[in-house]
Image: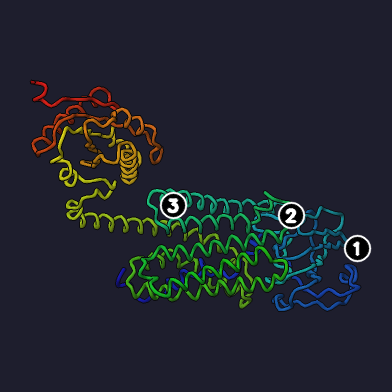
Amino acid sequence: MQSAPHYRLLSLVAAFLLALGWSRPVTAQTDRSGQPVSVCVVRAQPGMTPLSLFVGTTRFDCNPQQTTLGGGDYWVRSVPVQRSGAVEIRVASLWQRAVTLYALYADGTIVSQRLDQQGTMRHIQLGAIVGQPLPARGAPLVRLLWHVEGAANLRGILRDARIATPEQAVRSNLLLAALYGGFAGLCIALFTYNLALWATLRHRFQLAYCAMVLGLLCYAISSSGALAWAWPELANNDRMRINYLTLGVSAVAALLFARTFFEPRVFAGGLGRLFTVAAATMLAATLGYALFGPSNVWLLDRCFTLAFAGQLLVVGPMLWRAWRTRSNYLWLFALAWGAPVFVACFRVASGLSLIQWNFWIDNSTIVMMTLEALLSSFAIAYRVRVLSLERDAAREGELAALLLAEIDPLTGLLNRRAFLAAVIGRTGEQMLLILDLDHFKLINETIGHDGGDDVLRAVARTLQLSVPDAALIARIGGEEFAIVLPADTPIEPRDILDRLRATRMPYDVAVTASIGKCIGPLQREVDWKALYGAADRALYDAKSAGRDRARIRALPDRIAA
């Protein structure tokens, strides 16, 4: 779209930010089931006990902006509640050392459950929700209290507290299983599809896209809490470090995808180096958090965020350069990444505590990236189509020049013109071998024309290894090869066929050939026509006899003699 209007450029600026600009990974994918519970917090002090906090006059801070209080140990108290029967207390999973839940009942009984990091993992539900069941008692539940130890308070001290029935908890898991399962299936399909395309076409942007999709798949498994079900012995904070690792790798892959998807002219000069620095910084920040997160989680989280900000800074120049150089693919990025990045702006603001954490913002990633994945698959298909058209046009433009060249561009062997110029005029008796691949049309139909080209290259290499260096080898037709060497050379056609059968071909296809042989002079052009005619008839004899064999014919005048 060489004349794309400015609004498309602005759309893309809003469009590529989230793939590169999730400033923080999802810490919890909490669901909306259950009764919301408002909470207030107070920093832990010596002498505080659950009983004194339940009935005492300790002043709690009920400001929802918990991140302004800093890290450390806290007590969190709910407003009064009235619930009977079995319930499950559900909160968002956050970076903490341990959490103890105290439940006060109307008869004065206090029930406690303490979860360290491993205990938290055993209570993780889908959506990275920590669910602690409380059995039914004779008296109703009237209040909740949490003792949070070692809160990093990057997103809050205790978020999205809810009281759910067992049925609501099960329903939440089923709904989120459908969401994450659908996203995982989409990622697997796109990864397989693009990896197969890369194996055939070898375009680097396809490999980068596979890395991005694989990273998002791993991120979804970890951030959703499904990893806790597969690996319950893992510490919950370590699961969050895996969140950062997989999301950071996905972001770096997104940069590489953009770098290889656009035309090389977009990244000419310093912009290419700027992208390299941004990707290296993001990777270093990601590894730093994943490896050393517990040592100073707040500082490493800020480094992670700043690295994403650095990636955002390079997106603007990239889009500007793409617009200035009239890139054909700018509108594709705007289409594919518009919706995800619109939501990303809110995600970044939430991660920087500019706006309050929100369930819908936190859960928008999977839905938006599903949309992006579907649209990007069309973008990649269009990109491949454009490359194919450019390749076909280049081949047509170079056809005339290739016909005059001496080397066959596909196999590296002599072409027909150069071969005839080299063999006509040779003194002494010469041996001509005409080799034709069997059922080559079927090979092309099975693995495609690009795969057929790979087979022809492999056959050419095998022929070069099967004959002496003094032999002249040429590709004289589509799948037809010619070999000329002195008649007294100790070589048999069946040896060439044996070696061809033993060679491992691309895509493991079985390749055989038939050979026609004739011996005679090659001093003049008329000699070549006679020798080639006899060898060609011998080749026809080999084909008629069942293929994968060699036949010999003498020159007609020598038969008469």
The residue shown at (90%, 71%) is 52
Q: Earlier in the sequence, mark 3 or mark 2?
A: 2
The residue shown at (41%, 63%) is 260
The residue shown at (66%, 62%) is 241
Judge by depth and name the residue closer to the eye, 195 or 533: 533
The residue pinned by badge 3 equals: 194
The residue pinned by badge 1 equals: 108
Q: Earlier in the sequence, mark 1 or mark 2?
A: 1
Element under disc 3: helix
Mark 1 and mark 2 residues within 8 Å of each other at the beta carbon? no
- Amino acid type, mark 1: Gly
- Amino acid type, mark 2: His
Q: Which mark is residue 267?
A: none
The residue pinned by badge 2 equals: 123
- Nearer to us of marks 1 and 2 is 2
Q: Earlier in the sequence, mark 1 or mark 3?
A: 1
Hey, which quadrant is residue 434 in on the image? top left
| Mark 2 burial class by Cα count in 10 Å: few <14, some 14-19, many 20+ | some
Residue 299 image point, x, y percent:
67, 74
Element under disc 2: loop
Judge by depth and name the residue closer to the eye, 102 or 307: 307
Judge by depth and name the residue closer to the eye, 449 or 519: 519
Asked if residue 369 shows in the view, the reply is: yes
Judge by depth and name the residue closer to the eye, 357 or 71: 71
What is the quadrant of the C terminus in the image?
A: top left
Residue 368 image point, x, y percent:
51, 62
